[in-house]
Amino acid sequence: MYKDEYYENLNLIQKRKDDGNEATGQTAAWMFAVANFSVLLSILIKLVTRFVPLTLHMNAQVTEFNHVQKKYLKKPMRTCDYCYAS
């Protein structure tokens, strides 16, 4: 009986430890998705401008939107100015 109790306690401890690993995995997955959102958006916009018949004005607007989202979504975030001072 002592052996069974030991393994039951061990299983409870392992289940508690797995919750932290699950949270870490979820956080990593969300960060990966957010980081690649701008890349997916850029690819979709390029496909739209290439294969969907748009007017010249609409095509220019979509292309300009793609440039803006690349400028603001793909650049690295600067958390503090003094970190990059040289």
Image: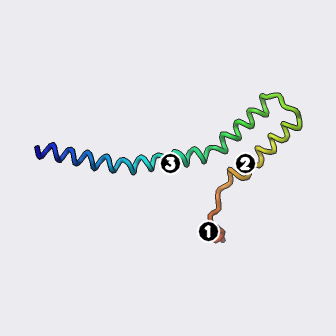
> Could you tell me which quadrant the C terminus lies in?
bottom right
Answer with mark 1 or mark 2, whichever residue precedes in sequence: 2
| Dot 2: element | helix
Which residue matches tag 3?
Answer: 28
Q: CA distance from mark 1 to mark 2?
A: 24 Å
**Residue at (21% x, 44% y) in the render:** 8
> Please, what is the three-letter code of the amino acid marked with disc 2?
Lys
Which residue matches tag 1?
Answer: 83
The image position of residue 62, as x and y in percent, is: 80, 40
Q: Is residue 5 left or right of residue 58?
A: left
**Residue at (62% x, 64% y) in the render:** 79
Q: CA distance from mark 3 to mark 1?
A: 25 Å
The image position of residue 25, as x and y in percent, is: 45, 46
> Please, what is the three-letter code of the amino acid marked with disc 1?
Cys
Which residue matches tag 2?
Answer: 70
- Based on the displayed image, in which of its 4 quarters is residue 63 positioned? top right
- Based on the displayed image, in which of its 4 quarters is residue 80 positioned? bottom right
- Based on the displayed image, in which of its 4 quarters is residue 82 positioned? bottom right
Q: Residue furthest left?
A: 1
The image position of residue 66, as x and y in percent, is: 76, 44
Q: Is residue 35 left or right of residue 17?
A: right
Q: CA distance from mark 2 to mark 3?
A: 23 Å
Which color mode does the image show? rainbow
**Residue at (78% x, 31% y) in the render:** 50
Q: Is residue 73 left or right of residue 55?
A: left
